[in-house]
Image (cartoon, rainbow, N blue to C red):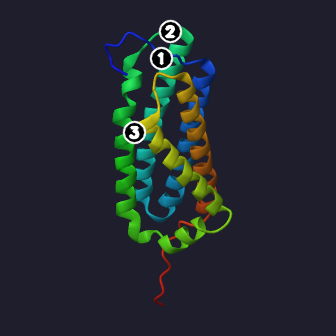
Amino acid sequence: MDKLDKTLPDFSLSLALVDALPVIFFFLSSLSIAKELKKIHSLGGLLFNIGGILAYLGGFFQVLWKLIIALFNKNIYIFHSQIKYLLPLGFIFIIISLIVSHSTINWKKLITKLLSMPCLIFVVIIMFCNLLMISFLFTMNQLNTKSHWKEECVNVIFQGSFLICTHIASKNEINRKENKQK
């Protein structure tokens, strides 16, 4: 949305509240992963936590922006604009955390867990939702309320599946690589 554009998007309170769900789901997922990662690599866990919090704040301010539009018909643009700074910065921290801690993660065990039932069901759902979200970038009219609902529903399913998959897979699965030497 252009800062100078005086036309407010048509966000209902229900749409703004539904938009909060994927933000909350992502935050819970990132906390779960950071907690498990911190057990095996304290710096990696800390960086992941910082990244998750930054990404969460980007989503939080986006939800807050939509709530203010829905409730007060006001555009506080600074809330809307934060997502384009905080989200990428958060993901940069998450990527750095995985780079610095990659040698302590038992990737084989983790990937095996992700590709086993019941995680596999959620991985497939996540991949399908990703494809839908990418197609939405090119096909959706951002000013159309129905488009926003479709996008939010897919995002809720995506982040909900990610949360469930994260919970199942992180249950003692991001273990330190076992030392095979005696």
Q: Relative to 79, does residue 23 appear above or below in the rendering? A: below
Give, as a three-letter code, the residue at label 1.
Answer: Pro
Which quadrant would residue 123 be assigned to in this image? bottom right
Mark 2 or mark 1, which is nearer the start of the sequence?
Answer: 1
Q: Callout 1: helix, strand or loop?
A: loop
Q: Which mark is residue 73?
A: 2
In depth, the one of 67 and 152 nearer the eye is 152
Which of discs 1 and 3 lies nearer the camera? The answer is 1
- Marks 1,3: beta carbons within 8 A: no
Q: What residue appears at the point 38 percent right and 18 percent down from the top-left corner? A: 77
Write down the quadrant of residue 167 in the picture: bottom right
Whether residue 54 can be seen here: yes
Q: How far, Cα to Cα, is label 1 from label 2?
A: 9 Å
Reading the image, the residue beneath label 3 is 87
* Residue for badge 1: 9
Foreground mark, 3 or 2, reads 2
In this rendered view, identify the residue nearer to me: 143 or 177.
Answer: 143
Q: Is residue 26 left or right of residue 117?
A: left
Residue farthest to the right, as pictured = 118
Image coords of residue 84 (percent x, y): 35, 33
Q: Is residue 32 visible?
A: no
Residue 104 or 162: which is nearer the viewer? 162
Name the element at disc 3.
helix
User: Residue at coordinates 43% horizontally, 40% vertically from top-left?
Assistant: 55
What amino acid type is highlighted by mark number 2?
A: Asn
Distance CA(mark 1)–CA(mark 3): 22 Å
| Most foreground residue, 13 or 78 | 13
Mark 1 vs mark 2, foreground winner is 1
Q: From what the image shows, is residue 78 above or below residue 130?
A: above
